[in-house]
Image: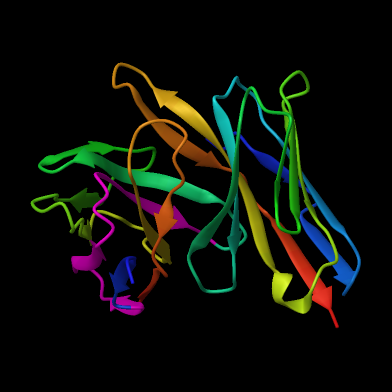
Amino acid sequence: DGGITQSPKYLFRKEGQNVTLSCEQNLNHDAMYWYRQDPGQGLRLIYYSQIVNDFQKGDIAEGYSVSREKKESFPLTVTSAQKNPTAFYLCASSIGGYHQPQHFGDGTRLSIL
Amino acid sequence: SQQGEEDPQALSIQEGENATMNCSYKTSINNLQWYRQNSGRGLVHLILIRSNEREKHSGRLRVTLDTSKKSSSLLITASRAADTASYFCATDSLIMNTGFQKLVFGTGTRLLVSP
């Protein structure tokens, strides 16, 4: 079955540590996205990529970095510069263009030790 | 910034009843989408309605869109306990100078359907 796989499901970060969240899709989608969700809130866009080897900052990119070296993969690094990283992180993909739904993974919950 | 605002924030009903959730937004759109999120899971796309459409159906779901009032509603008929989830509306927002449309999500409605 096609879909999006996020790993790990739970992740703990120590102070001053960078951590990387994995996102892999086998839907052959061009566009991929990273969102942050805080309790009781909607989703906020961190980074997006319309095509391989290209990505753009979203609304809350500070303290995060991404890469898009392969169509299937869009890892997110939460750096030590992100002072409040505790949240639920969701990866999504879409065909791209207008009027297209996004397909989501099951998320990674990041907490601070 | 969040463009969509859902109302109510929480809704509790009995199985078999209908559930109606509303979404209001601020700027013009090309489409509006509804998603469902079960606790601790990712979002699942339910339905997309384009700005030139007024109503759309999918199974027990009925979505309406009123662009003059900048509002949409999601109706779930004959609800089931399995419909318990959070429901989000999302509107498209054009990113300047990119031709790329991102989705802007509301804060969601938490629906509880009791057996």
**Residue at the bottom extreme?**
B115
Residue B6 appears left or right of A60: right
Residue B9 appears left or right of A26: right
Give the residue displayed 14% in from the left and 49% down from the top. Answer: A68
Res A84 seen here: no
- The spot of residue A2 in percent (x, y) is 32, 66
Looking at the rendered structure, the number of numbered marks drawn on it comes to: 0
Res B66 seen here: yes
State whether residue A104 is above or below residue A107. above
- The spot of residue B7 in percent (x, y) is 78, 46
Give the residue displayed 29% in from the left and 42% down from the top. Answer: A48
- The spot of residue B95 in percent (x, y) is 38, 24
What secondary structure prevails in the magenta region? Answer: strand
Give the residue displayed 71% in from the left and 22% down from the top. Answer: B67
- Looking at the rendered image, the quarter that the N terminus of chain A falls into is bottom left
Does the magenta portion include A70? no
**Which segment did they paint magenta?**
A9-38
Does the magenta portion include A16? yes
State whether residue B108 is above or below residue B104. below
Q: Quadrant of residue A103?
A: bottom left
Between residue A94 and residue B86, name the one nearer to us.
A94
- The spot of residue A41 in percent (x, y) is 59, 54
State whether residue B35 is above or below residue B42. above
Between residue A103 and residue A43, name the one nearer to us.
A103
Give the residue displayed 44% in from the left and 40% down from the top. Answer: A100
